[in-house]
Image (cartoon, helix red, strand yellow):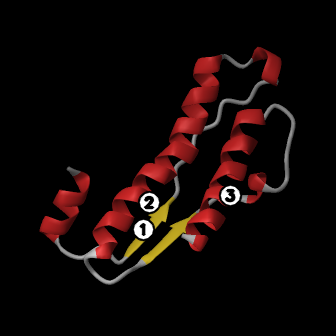
Amino acid sequence: AIVESLRAEGAVDILAANAGSGIFRPAGEKSVADWRRTIDIKLSGAFRCSRNAIQAMRGNGGGFIVHLSRLEGKNLFADGAAYNASRIGVNGMSEAMILD
C-alpha cells in the first residue's frame, strides 16, 4: 500500500532512513520486549522503508538510500546491547544492499 501511494504521488528519488529509540539497561536486565522494540524500530524499520523505496525507485530508473546509523554501530558502550546490535545490523544491511 505504501509503494502504491508513493507511485500515485510521484517519483521517489531518495530515502533517508533515520529512526531511533533507546532503552539502556544491562543485557541481563533488559526484557525481550525491550530488545525487540529496539531492533524493530531501528533495524527492521530501516529494512521495511528501504524495501518499499526500492520497489518505488525501480520505476524511476533508480535512486539513493541513506541509512543514518551513528557511531554506536562501531563504538560499543555498556547497557547498549540492543542499541549497538541494531546499529551494527543497519551497517551490515547497508553494505549488503550496496552489493544487491
Rendered location of residue 9, percent (x, y):
15, 68
**Residue 65 as seen in the image, left or right of residue 85:** left
Number of residues whose C-alpha sits closer than 10 Å to that of mark 3, classed few (under 14), some (14–19) or many (20 or more): few
Q: Marks 1 and 3, how far apart in space? A: 18 Å
Mark 1 or 3: in front is 3
Disc nearest the viewer among 1 and 2: 2
Q: Which mark is residue 50?
A: 2
Sequence order check: which comes first, mark 1 or mark 3? 1
Residue found 22% across the figure and 63% down from its top: 6
> What is the quadrant of residue 54 in the picture?
bottom left
The x and y percentages for residue 51 are 40, 57
Q: x, y (%) of residue 45?
A: 47, 46
Q: Which residue is mark 3?
A: 92
Q: Report whether 79 appears left or right of 39.
A: right
Q: Amino acid at mark 2?
A: Ser
Residue hosting label 1? 15
Amino acid type assigned to the residue bearing label 1 in the image: Leu
Residue at point 77% right, 36% down? 80
